Image: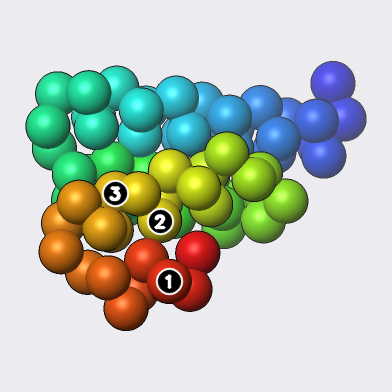
Amino acid sequence: MSARAATRTRAHDCYARGRELRARGDVAAAAAAYREALALDPSLAAAWISLGIALRVDGRLSDAEDC
């Protein structure tokens, strides 16, 4: 596996962890996982969307608008 593919796999793993955390109600931890995914792969659109939703649910509307 190439380094780029490995990085994308790690990004998807972080995104999946964020979804699990969000499903458990841990919005802050989910947002952190989505941010980690985006640091690895900024083109991961689902992570941007999920981060925006998590921030909105957490009451951080101005931060959510940037997503």
- Residues at circles 2 and 3 in contact by the CB criterion of under 8 Å: yes
Vertical side of 51 occupied by 12: above or below: above
Query: In the image, residue 42 lies at what x, y percent?
Result: 67, 56
Residue beneath disc 1: 65
Residue 34 is at least partly visible in this image: no
Residue occupying the point 66% across, 44% down:
44
* Distance CA(mark 1)–CA(mark 2): 7 Å
- Residues at circles 1 and 2 in contact by the CB criterion of under 8 Å: yes
The mark that comes first in sequence, 1 or 2, is 2
Vertical side of 49 occupied by 11: above or below: above
Vertical side of 18 occupied by 54: above or below: below
Query: In the image, residue 24 lies at what x, y percent?
Result: 14, 23
Report the number of numbered marks.
Answer: 3
Residue beneath disc 3: 54
Query: In the image, residue 14 lies at what x, y percent?
Result: 46, 34
Query: In the image, residue 11 lies at what x, y percent?
Result: 59, 37
Mark 3 or mark 1, which is nearer to you? 1
**Image quarter hosting the N terminus:** top right
Q: Could you classify mark 1 by the number of other residues whose Cα lies within 10 Å: few (under 14), some (14-19), or many (20 or more)?
A: few
- Name the residue type under label 3: Ala
Q: Could you classify mark 2 by the number of other residues whose Cα lies within 10 Å: few (under 14), some (14-19), or many (20 or more)?
A: many
Residue 18 is at least partly visible in this image: yes
- Name the residue type under label 1: Glu
Residue beneath disc 2: 52
- Name the residue type under label 2: Gly
The mark that comes first in sequence, 3 or 1, is 3
Residue occupying the point 20% across, 51% down:
57
* Distance CA(mark 3)–CA(mark 1): 11 Å
* Distance CA(mark 2)–CA(mark 3): 5 Å
